[in-house]
Image: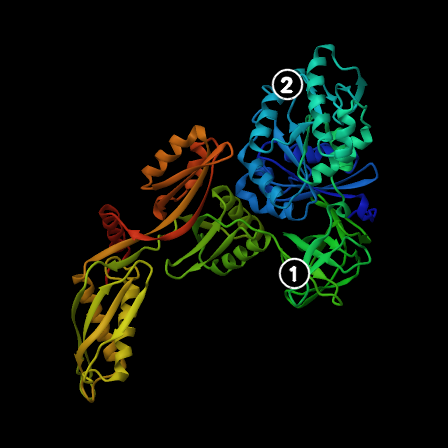
């Protein structure tokens, strides 16, 4: 651990979530900012596995960002807390955690691939929290880079309020600088430098008309955001740069303007200008305004970023490191937190001592004596605090809303590769959930499987890699069994009679039962229609219990039989030999016999699937859904994209995320939710019965 770090006060802090689609250059840009600022002394490389904020073995192996990670940079006497987030939607939970604690954002967009689905999804999340954003068009030095094409996509798919502050000079191998539209000067980058150094020069003559067009639109856009400035603009006055910057910052905080910069994180080109504008344009925790919490009575409390005010800190990420234990990352929203403080976790009625208070920088941490309101820190070995928990002073209990986690939409069944590791699996899976709440697991008693669920195949694959690396547990995976149901289609009735005599007291139960189908989702209903005491009242419930127990085991293929009414209307008893157990058995026998006469049907779970896709892939998406026995309900426009809604059987959706990604070249995403049960077609019924008989789970 390095020596104690400098304490930055609230006005000098910027909390910035860096986001974009996978491969857009977010991590490279974060690395470049920290390198140029001098926080790191080595320029990292994602491909070489040594980038500042991609440091776990899984990230090095896959060469992608998987976890939210933090870097910090001191620039213009301001601390930039950079929250680097994954770009693949399989890791959207990490992105949502980053958005929750940010006051501003930088959207990184690849000048070759343009705006992609991962950027749109996080942009919408920032929109929901009213976070001002800067856009950085990256990889301008790559072949086929196009600023104009990317700018057009930004306006179509993100916001028509996006406006360039800089425009590039050249592209690809010809990219050599930018024109700053405020100063109307060219910034020509120094060859061979990877720190983004440049020399100021006159605008290339051939770009004069283009620069004038972009500048006029920029000034007009900013002026329109302020009445005083607009009046001066309309009267032809020369507008003051500082006033333009001030109005631009205010308009950004209102979500009215999104400035665009460009460059290359790999070479550092354009990064200095971006760093300057993060300081100038994005708000400090003070400028972002107060946040809401609740007191113990449930009353809303305004939490101000005041060092003398009530302490309120939100834990937004938990990781586990060998020889260190759990690390809790948190943002201070109110009050200040010092090394050695004791804080309260009101949700768990636990006190926590803050020791070795640190600020994170990739895989490294620097101890700090105090964190001002708005700053981000990390502490080890909190005893009973988890992601989403609030820490506060015991004298003023406060809680803050947690993180809106996306729901898992894909599952795998997992089993121990080696006998005797079952307990280790349960412990390891629980630890994974602690680190990543979007990863969920549990034993499903009906299916007889341990089910792990996540946000996509890659998410589950990486999670299970962590399970092996961190907790030494090896698992095998298989397709989860489908929770089919059985039901009846017609009314039928019959007798169930149980008689057993083995010397001494015997067992006798006799009942007549009528089964009737109920509406889908209505479950099981038992009706007592016994008259004249042919079955004593005390034994009637036993008939219902026997029917319910038998229904759980099914008749057709061993799945629970649902949505029916069972009516007991006649029977007989023996004054000595009748008992609860005898009538339970009689009820069970009656059910099995009558259910077959009532016409059995197999029900399969149906999911409501929503697929968001570019229009170009609509035909392929609908065709694929049809092949999966999907029933398309309709389509609707969502900006430049289309949303297809369909009802699809669950057993047709195994590994659908990967299939959809392949079908649309990674441009589509889907969500699903359980809708209900529908009768399965004959070929599915036969397949399920055959499998049940093979596995010994068929009718009993």
Residue 172, disc: 2
Residue 575 in the image, given as x and y percentages of width and height: 19, 89
Q: Is residue 35 visible?
A: no
Please state, as top left, top right, bottom left or bottom right, where the C terminus lies in the image: bottom left
Would you place residue 41 above or below residue 513 in this image?
above
Would you place residue 261 above or below residue 608 in this image?
above
Residue toward you, 43 or 85: 85
Image-based side of 591 in relation to 225, left or right: left
Image-based side of 560 in relation to 504, left or right: right
Q: Is residue 127 visible?
A: yes
Residue toward you, 437 or 150: 150
Crowding near pointer 2: few (<14 within 10 Å), some, many (20+)? some
Would you place residue 626 above or below residue 308 in this image?
above
CB-based contact (under 8 Å), mark 2 and mark 1? no
Residue 385, disc: 1
Residue 640 in the image, given as x and y percentages of width and height: 50, 31
Give how far apart the Cα atoms at labels 2 and 1 are. 49 Å
Residue toward you, 658 or 525: 525
Image-based side of 698 in relation to 33, left or right: left
Give the structural element (helix, strand or loop) at label 2: helix
Q: Quadrant of residue 356?
A: bottom right
């Amino acid at each position: 651990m390095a020596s104690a770090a400098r304490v930055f006060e609230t006005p000098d802090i910027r909390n910035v979530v860096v986001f974009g689609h996978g491969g857009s250059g977010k991590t490279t840009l974060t690395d470049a900012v920290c390198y140029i600022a001098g926080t790191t002394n080595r320029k990292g490389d994602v491909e070489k596995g040594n980038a500042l904020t991609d440091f776990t073995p899984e990230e090095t192996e896959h060469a992608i960002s998987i976890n939210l990670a933090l870097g910090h940079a001191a620039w213009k006497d301001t601390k930039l807390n950079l929250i680097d987030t994954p770009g693949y939607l399989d890791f959207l939970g990490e992105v949502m955690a980053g958005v929750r604690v940010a006051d501003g954002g930088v959207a990184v967009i690849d000048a070759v691939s343009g705006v992609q689905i991962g950027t749109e999804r996080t942009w919408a999340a920032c929109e929901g929290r009213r976070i001002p954003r800067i856009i950085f068009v990256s990889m301008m030095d790559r072949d086929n880079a196009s600023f104009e094409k990317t700018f057009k996509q930004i306006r179509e798919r993100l916001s028509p309020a996006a406006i360039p502050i800089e425009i590039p000079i050249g592209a690809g191998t010809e990219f050599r600088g930018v024109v700053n539209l405020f100063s109307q000067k060219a910034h020509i980058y120094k060859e061979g430098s990877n720190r983004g150094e440049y020399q100021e020069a006159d605008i290339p003559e051939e770009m004069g008309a283009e620069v004038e067009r972009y500048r006029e639109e920029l000034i007009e856009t900013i002026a329109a955001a302020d009445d005083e400035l607009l009046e001066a603009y309309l009267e032809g006055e020369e507008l003051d740069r500082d006033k333009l910057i001030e109005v631009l910052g205010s308009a950004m905080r209102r979500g009215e303007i999104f400035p665009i910069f460009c460059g290359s994180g790999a070479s550092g080109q354009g990064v200095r200008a971006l760093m300057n504008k993060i300081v100038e344009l994005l708000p400090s925790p003070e400028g972002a305004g107060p946040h809401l919490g609740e007191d113990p009575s449930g009353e809303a409390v305004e939490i101000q970023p005041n060092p003398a005010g009530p302490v309120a800190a939100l834990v937004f990420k938990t990781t586990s490191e060998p020889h260190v234990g759990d690390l809790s990352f948190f943002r201070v929203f109110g009050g200040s937190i010092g090394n050695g403080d004791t804080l309260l976790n009101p949700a768990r009625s636990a006190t926590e001592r803050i020791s070795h208070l640190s600020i994170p920088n990739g895989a490294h941490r620097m101890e700090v004596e105090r964190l001002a309101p708005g700053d981000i820190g990390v502490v080890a070995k909190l005893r009973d605090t988890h992601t989403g928990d609030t820490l506060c002073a015991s004298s003023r209990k406060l809680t803050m809303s947690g993180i809106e986690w996306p729901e898992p939409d894909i599952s795998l069944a997992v089993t121990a590769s080696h006998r005797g590791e079952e307990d280790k699996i349960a412990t390891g899976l629980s630890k994974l959930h602690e680190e990543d709440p979007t990863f969920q697991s549990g034993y499903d008693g009906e299916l007889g499987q341990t089910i792990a669920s996540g946000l996509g195949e890659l998410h589950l694959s990486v999670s299970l890699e962590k399970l092996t690396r961190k907790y030494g547990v090896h698992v095998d995976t298989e397709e989860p069994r489908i929770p089919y149901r059985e039901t009846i289609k017609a009314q039928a009735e019959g007798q169930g009679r149980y008689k057993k005599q083995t010397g001494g007291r015997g067992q006798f139960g006799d009942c007549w039962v009528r089964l009737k189908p109920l509406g889908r989702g209505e479950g099981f209903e038992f009706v007592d229609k016994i008259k004249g005491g042919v079955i004593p009242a005390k034994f009637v419930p036993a008939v219902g219990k026997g029917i319910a127990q038998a229904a759980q085991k099914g008749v057709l293929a061993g799945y629970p039989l649902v949505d029916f009414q069972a009516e007991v209307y006649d029977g007989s008893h023996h004054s000595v030999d009748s008992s609860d157990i005898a009538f339970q058995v009689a009820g069970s026998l009656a059910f099995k016999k009558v259910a077959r006469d009532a016409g059995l049907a197999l029900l399969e779970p149906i999911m409501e699937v929503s697929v968001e896709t570019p229009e170009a892939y609509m035909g392929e998406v609908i065709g694929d859904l049809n092949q999966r026995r999907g029933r398309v309900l309709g389509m609707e426009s969502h900006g430049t994209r289309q949303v297809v809604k369909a009802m699809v059987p669950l057993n047709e959706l195994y590994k659908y995320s990967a299939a959809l990604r392949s079908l649309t070249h990674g441009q589509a995403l889907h969500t699903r939710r359980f809708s209900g049960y529908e009768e399965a077609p004959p070929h599915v019924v036969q397949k399920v019965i055959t499998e049940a008989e093979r596995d010994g789970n068929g009718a009993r």
